[in-house]
Amino acid sequence: MNRNFRFNVPLERFAYLTGRSLSSFKRDFMQTFGTSPGLWLKKKRLDEAYFQIHQQHQRPSDVYLEVGFEDLSHFSFAFKKEFGKNPSELRMP
């Protein structure tokens, strides 16, 4: 998952690749990482987006697709919820 978090891979596919059913995958993931795979993926994508916007001075409109979000408004909402700022507020001109 660390290598493929940027791709929009369904959790069912991750479960299949690990040789588990979806419910077993989710249960094992929760026991190992203390969070659900869906929340882990979202956090990983948002952290990568934060890095690209803040450190590499990328535009949010360029970053959201690259880190695995399909919709800019959903990305902006999730980003603000996670970091307390809109992605455009974070970027320095």
Image (spheres, helix red, strand yellow):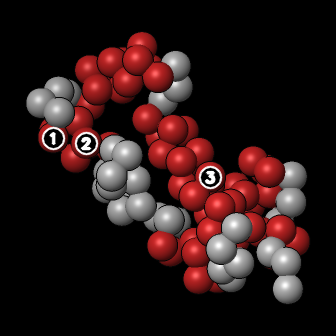
Secondary element at tag 2: helix
Q: CA distance from mark 2 to mark 3?
A: 20 Å
Q: Which residue is mark 1?
A: 17
The picture places residue 93, in percent across and down from the top left corner, at: 85, 85
Q: Which mark is residue 76?
A: none
Mark 2, residue position: 14
In the image, 20: left or right of 80? left
- C-alpha gap between disc 3 and disc 1: 25 Å
User: Where residue 18 sits: x, y (%)?
Assistant: 17, 33
User: Residue 29's image quarter?
Assistant: top left
Query: Can residue 60 be seen at all in this image of the molecule?
Result: no
The image position of residue 6, as x and y in percent, is 41, 61
| Residue contact between numbered discs 1 and 2, judged by CB atoms under 8 Å | yes
Dot 3 amino acid type: Asp
Q: Which mark is residue 47?
A: 3
Q: Secondary structure at mark 3?
A: helix
SS for tag 1? helix
Looking at the image, the residue that sits furthest to the front is: 55
The picture quadrant where one finds residue 37 is top left
Distance between mark 1 and mark 2 Cα atoms: 5 Å
